[in-house]
Amino acid sequence: MNTAWSSNDIDDGRQAGPRPRLAYLLSIYPAISHTFFLNEIAALRRLGFAIDVASINRPERAAGPASALEASELKTTFCIKATSLTRTFLVLLKILFRRPQVVFRGLRAALSLDSWNLPATGYALFYLAEALLLGDWLRRRGHRHLHIHFGGPVATVGMLTAIAWQVSYSLMIHGPDEFYDVEKFYLRQKVERAHFVICISDYCRSQVMKVCDPAHWTKLHVVRLGVDLGIFEPRAPVDRGDAIEITCVGRFVPAKGHLILLRTFSNLLRRGYSLRLRLIGDGSERSGMESFIAREKLGGSVIFEGALNHEATRHKLMQADIFVLASFAEGLPVALMEAMAMGIPCISTFVAGIPELIRDGLDGLLVPASSDQALSAALERLISDAELRRRFAIAGRQRVEEFYDLQKNVRSLADTLQGYL
């Protein structure tokens, strides 16, 4: 989880000419688990972009107070699902009578997405209603281009908006969900209709290439995510003289592999290692995790912190000896970048874009996803070798400085956006 943007990071001295106005569409904003959106938008504004943000869903709230930036974004973000039914009905009625061609274009596009699948068509019509509301907001704000993060349902709304209101759109694809069922998410249609597409990793671009016609490959660009290196700085060495502390930051969902981590942790405790596990996050898997902890009698060694705000998360990371993310599926986790930037030796899995961030044995350790035996062996290596932890701490920080510096990568994003818009 990223923290709020710092005051001294990006200056706009390098920009060539005026920056464009831009509307962002996100599934949920601000979001606890995707605070890199907050940083990215703030950074682009510092570079001169005028950005308005629309969110499909109501924003999440973390434990603790919101930052000043989050509070400001909460006030100015257009939340589609926060629109009252009365207001929704009146806006849709206004569009139908004043701009019937907008409704007809949108209806034709929605019905053609998967015309023989009644449930899918029902969802498409619901997305169309959101698209009409979004397009009305874009028109009132004077926007002619929509930039969309993720390729799932939020991009379906964005694509229908673009078709109905005849505006252009771009995508920033993260994965992995849209790669699992490209037909369900209409990924080929979204990519081929898009003005341009930004991918967060080379792996991500390969998956997009796989589903679209090679004629569209030239509009696919890799722009990596990043972290604020001025905020996520190497912490002072922890010399607590007792248990090694393992930390994991991530939503409690099946894809994050928390149960594999817990099984590994339980096995290492039985073998006599003095360990403590700190889990930061929340989600649907929490009850299953708590049941496992109760069965294995791990309650005194596992700490549930809940979904913390950004500063609290960073503070907890300062106490970590080892960071572990045992994911089954990912895009490219910003949480790993943050831990590496803070000089915490990391273990993760050979999944998606993670090997682009961590080179196994050089910047940290990678293990096969789902293998608690391999994860156990990797943890034993780091627990038993303080010098290896120190080397990975230095190498991980250097890796992030070279390829995942938020300042550099946002400038690359700004240049890409400027080039097209």
Image: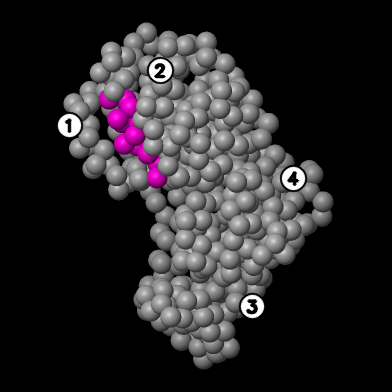
Q: Tell me if residue 353 comes above or below residue 304 in the rendering.
A: below
Residue 178: x and y in percent read: 50, 58
Which numbered disc flags the more N-terminal residue, 4 or 3? 4
Residue 62 position, x and y percent, is: 38, 44
Does 413 lie within the magenta span?
no
Query: Which quadrant of the figure has residue 401?
Result: top right
Quarter-of-image position of residue 329: top left
Crowdedness near tag 1: few (<14), some (14–19) or many (≥20) residues, C-alpha within 10 Å: few
In front: mark 4 or mark 3?
3
Spot occupied by residue 22 in the image (x, y as percentages of width and height): 65, 61
Which amino acid is tagged 1? Arg
Cα gap from disc 4 to disc 3, whole angstroms: 32 Å
Which of marks 2 and 4 precedes in the sequence?
4
State how far apart marks 2 and 1 are (Cα). 23 Å
* Amino acid type at mark 3: Gln
Q: Which residues are magenta?
A: 255-266
Q: Please identify, in this view, whether the residue under mark 3 or under mark 1 is nearer the observer.
A: 1
